[in-house]
Amino acid sequence: MAPHDSDSSDEDTEDFTTTDVLLGYASKELTGDTISQLGGRPTWLDPSQPPSAVLARCRICNDYMPLLLQLHGDLPEYFPGHERRLHLFGCRRRTCRRKEGSIRAIRSVRVTESSRHARNKKVEKSSTDSRSPVTAPLQNLGNSIFGGAPPPTSNGQTNPFSSPTTSTNNNPFSANPFSTSLGSLPGSSESPKPAVPEVPDLPDTFAEKVRLSSPPLTTPTPKTPPEPWPSDTDQAQPYPSYHLDADYETLDQFSEQPLPPTTMMDLDEPNGSASTSAKEDAETFESTIDKTFQRFADRLAQNPLQVLRYQFRGFPLLYSKTDTVGKLLAPHQHHFAGHDKNGSANKITTAQRAGSAAIGLPSCQRCGAGRVFELQLTPQTIAELEVDEVGLEGMEWGNVVVGVCSADCGGEAGAVRYVEEWVGVQWEERGKPY
């Protein structure tokens, strides 16, 4: 039980630990975050620059999908000056469930103009600071080696990597070595060569015929214009809208300790056989338990109303290790040790934040950088979004994992860019409570 649900005294606070996983809770009341929401209709960084509607279409049926989550994703400690938002869409059609492409994620990013100027100044300052201090102007080393007049200076400081302003090219590496004349090669005769008669210019009419007979240059295929974002009446029916409240995850440190084995006594058997039978029963019971799912269920049970788990560059809480997503991510789980919010080790398995540590996610298709975990949706999301649904034909997933570009690529000053990110869905398994 989390401490905010308990009336324990200060002496019992050591029984709990606060992890660095941020939990999100659905709320009908206003919270401090006016951007993040569960369900409803999406809003954009710039309403005049919405994404292409193709990004919100189901890859199976091609229909528009309703919004599952919109998250205010600014991370100034990692990407200063980047405005970020994350959007998740999910298809309602029953025939599209359990198929890849029925849930999609979009990351929108825009770089502020002030951030771009600050970054440029930082690069210039770094370049200036990296030079050795001098007390008097030095001779241009490049010109002393390759010749040529020194470039004009206005403030006594020159960029050694800038191109010279003279028209004569004195860099020996700038010329094509295969275009050197025979007369300049070692051992070649220096006697003057016979004059080559000049070829008179061809008539324009012939040149025109040559141009006409030559195949035309291929022009690049123009990009497909983005599909306009649909009006509210053309979009998919939205789910109920909730605000999001956030709090760090608090756990009972002893919640995942194994239960003591149950001793079974059979009065009709000799004393030695009772303990043997209990041990065999315990081994048989443990072999039938899905430990990954049990850990998932026990963890969520401590904060049962959570709809979102957020930990940028962390590791997701897996629903299963045997499905496609589990097989992809589980082998890399050992890279992340158990730590609490203060960085000290604890008995609860929580993901330790790392850089672009490999966790099994595919690389960003746009820039090639590694992807990192950012958030996951829990089954409580389904309960909140389908609160007004009639029947049992709802969403059928146990976990939705979102991985994003570790470089937050795509940002441009003043312009909003939209990048589709990786989504891993762990579908509900029959017979499990989630």
Image (cartoon, rainbow, N blue to C red):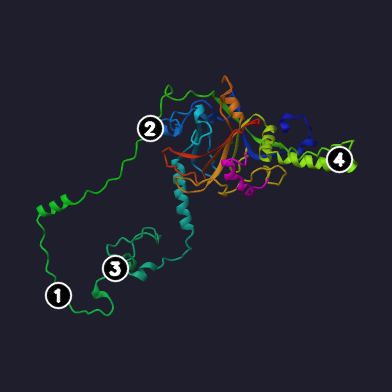
Is residue 31 in view from this perspective? no
Q: Which residue is mark 1?
A: 194
Q: Quick one: label 3 or label 4, which is nearer the N terminus?
A: 3
Gap in angstroms between the C-alphas marked 1 and 2: 67 Å
* Percent position of residue 308, x then y: 60, 33
Q: Label 4 near label 2: C-beta < 8 Å?
A: no
Q: Quick one: label 1 or label 4, which is nearer the N terminus?
A: 1
Q: Quick one: label 1 or label 3, which is nearer the N terminus?
A: 3
* Percent position of residue 236, x then y: 46, 25
Q: Which residue is mark 3?
A: 178
Q: Which secondary structure type mostly characterizes the magenta part of the structure? A: helix
Q: Quick one: label 1 or label 2, which is nearer the N terminus?
A: 1
Gap in angstroms between the C-alphas marked 1 and 3: 22 Å
Q: Amino acid at mark 2?
A: Glu
Q: Amino acid at mark 1?
A: Pro
Q: Residue 274 — which label?
A: 4
Q: Which residue is mark 2?
A: 227
Q: Residues within 10 Å of mark 3 (few under 14, many from 20)?
A: few
Side (left or right) of 298 relative to 385: right
**Is 182 placed above or below 25 here?**
below
Q: Label 4 near label 1: C-beta < 8 Å?
A: no
Residue range corresponding to the magenta coloring: 320-338
Q: In what element is the residue under mark 3? A: helix
